[in-house]
Image (cartoon, rainbow, N blue to C red):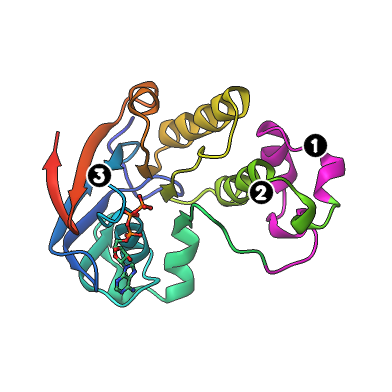
Amino acid sequence: MGSQDNGEGVSRLEVRGLGSAVIRDVSLRLGPGEGLAVTGPSGSGKTSLFRAIADLDPNEGEVLLSGEARSRMPAPEWRRRVAYVPAEPAWWLETAGEHLPEGGAAMAKRLGLAPALLGKPVASLSTGERQRLALAAAFARAPQVLLLDEPTSALDEANRGDVEDAILEMLAGGAALLIASHDPAQVGRLGLAVLRMQDGRVAEAE
Ligand SMILES: Nc1ncnc2c1ncn2[C@@H]1O[C@H](COP(=O)(O)OP(=O)(O)OP(=O)(O)O)[C@@H](O)[C@H]1O
């Protein structure tokens, strides 16, 4: 990975002293193409950390992308650059395909979602299909930071492999990644360092 970090999709994420109703004083740095697996027991604050970085909950502290402070960026700009995919995504449009950005069908297909499925009501999709739809929508927007909350929890091995390949490609393209995962094998396959949360704080970074 090159050291330049101003191109689209290439980013350096810095979190300084982030706090919210749940998390306390979290700091971390990720270079372009770097990822961290966020682990820790249920309720330790993994989702809350992602939501604070994505600016979806009230929070304090500083978050910077390639040196640019989040506080100086319009919110829509931050959302375009930083993609948060919750463990249980919400849906607001009728058909599956409507949730994809322009050109997103190719990514959906890569994750095993056939074109015919995109015309179906999103409510008729299986849990695993909806999980892949949310990921395809996020990946297709080519964000600079990916915040993925247990992204393969509802997937079989083949679909999980497709998702992991796409994640590795996003990293190779220079995106920064935080992924909540309870699966040490997955953390190994993705070649990630681990940040362990406990009671809303970073317990350990290795
Ligand atoms: N806005 C909030 N205000 C106060 N408490 C909250 C808020 N959001 C979540 N919590 C609580 O904070 C704790 C951490 O929740 P969080 O969802 O971040 O944990 P997690 O590590 O992602 O857990 P899991 O592995 O089960 O998904 C939980 O006890 C939760 O009930």
Q: Residues within 10 Å of mark 3 (few under 14, many from 20)?
A: many
The numbered mark, 3 or 1, whose residue comes first in the sequence reads: 3
Return the residue nearer the eye: 74 or 164: 164
Q: Secondary structure at mark 3?
A: loop
**Residue type marked 3:** Gly
Residue 66 percent location from the top left of the image: 28, 54
Residue where numbered disc 2 is placed: 130
Left or right: where 129 falls relative to 189: right
Residue at 37% from the left image edge and 30% from the top image edge: 183
Q: Which residues are magenta?
A: 92-118
**Residue type marked 1:** Ala
Q: CA distance from mark 3 to mark 2?
A: 25 Å
Residue where numbered disc 1 is placed: 114
Q: Splitting the image into 4 quarters, where does residue 128 fall?
A: top right
Residue where numbered disc 3 is placed: 40
- Whether label 3 touches label 1, CB < 8 Å: no
Residue 127 percent location from the top left of the image: 65, 46
> Does residue 149 show up?
yes
Left or right: where 55 falls relative to 137: left
